[in-house]
Image (cartoon, grey):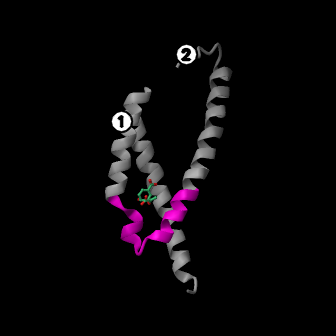
Amino acid sequence: MDVHCQSLAEVRANIDRIDRQLVALLAERGAFVAQAARFKRNSEEVKAPQRVEQVIAKVRELAQALGANPDVVEPVYRSMIAAFIQAELAEHAALAQQPG
Ligand SMILES: C=C(O[C@@H]1C=C(C(=O)O)C=C[C@H]1O)C(=O)O
């Protein structure tokens, strides 16, 4: 991180720029999470707790490698995945209502 801001406004402009990128990535990630529902038989498979722990371990390693704080990244990811699981459960229930 080599940008040294000269004002709070400059800090916030950078945060706003990054938030736009993050939300775009969340939209893309969410679309793939929704597709996962098609390949699962029940809500336990939707929740996939072993996969959650794999993702957490992976992003903690990535955080170390990329200069992020793993103790910030982990709770952010746990919260994000919990919300995605709720959306995937809703998608799974909607698919179960469809004929065929
Ligand atoms: C997308 C999946 O479904 C859920 C969402 C996950 C995620 O957001 O990374 C991980 C595991 C599951 O809880 C999956 O099983 O891969």
Q: Which residue is mark 2?
A: 2
Name which residue type carries label 1: Glu
Q: Quadrant of residue 40?
A: bottom left
Q: Residue at x 42, y 66 (%)?
A: 46
User: Can you say whether 41 is above or below 85 in the image?
Assistant: below
Q: Dot 1: what SS?
A: helix
Query: Where residue 55 appears, x then y in whole percent?
Result: 38, 48
Q: Which residue is mark 1?
A: 61
Q: Quadrant of residue 2?
A: top right
Magenta residues span 31-49
Q: Which numbered disc, 1 or 2, marks the residue closer to the eye?
A: 1
Q: Residue at x 58, y 58 (%)?
A: 31
Query: What type of secondary structure mainly makes up the magenta span?
Result: helix
Q: Quadrant of residue 13?
A: top right
Q: Say the numbered circle drawn on residue 43.
A: none
Per the model, the C-alpha gap separating discs 1 and 2 is: 22 Å
Q: Is mark 2 within 8 Å of ligand 1?
A: no
Which quadrant, please, contains the C terminus? bottom right
Q: Is mark 1 within 8 Å of ligand 1?
A: no
Res. 71 visible in picture? no
Whichever of labels 1 and 2 marks the residue nearer the N terminus, that label is 2
